[in-house]
Every structure is written in C-alpha cells, then in structure tokens.
Amino acid sequence: MLDVARTKTRQATKKALSRHRRAEQNVASKSKLRQFSSMRKPRHTTSYVGPSSKLIIR
C-alpha cells in the first residue's frame, strides 16, 4: 500500500512540475523571443536543428 501511494504522489509531483515548467517556458518565450536570445530557447525546439527550427523559434 505504501509503495502505491508513494508512486502516485511521485507521479502527481512530476505532473505538477512539468506543468509549472511549461508555464514558465511559455512566459519566458513570449517575453524574450522578441529580442531573440539563444540562451533561453524552449527546450523542445533545440532537439531538431535546421531551417524548420528557425521557423519554430521565431
């Protein structure tokens, strides 16, 4: 029983953390994409590089 509860809470915290991170990323991308800084690229755009990535970043 303890293990099940632990895994459930872990999953919940993971979900909450990912949601929070996503919200932070959205805010950061909206504010900082106007002056394009390569430091704060959203993480999911860095995975594929090429002409398509430029379109997504801007």
Image (cartoon, grey):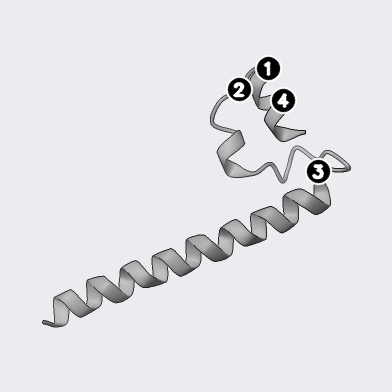
Numbered disc 2: secondary structure: loop
Amino acid identity at mark 2: Val
Q: Dot 2 corresponds to which residue?
A: 49
Residue at 57% across, 60% down: 21
Q: Dot 3 corresponds to which residue?
A: 33
Amino acid identity at mark 1: Pro
Q: Dot 1 corresponds to which residue?
A: 51
* Quadrant housing the C terminus: top right
**In the image, residue 19 lies at what x, y percent?**
52, 63
Disc 4 residue crowd, few under 14, some 14–19, many 20+, Cα 10 Å: few
Whichever of labels 3 and 4 marks the residue nearer the N terminus, that label is 3
Amino acid identity at mark 3: Leu
Amino acid identity at mark 4: Lys
Q: Is residue 41 left or right of residue 43?
A: right
Rounded to the nearest angstrom, the CA distance separating label 1 from label 3 is: 17 Å
Q: Dot 4 corresponds to which residue?
A: 54
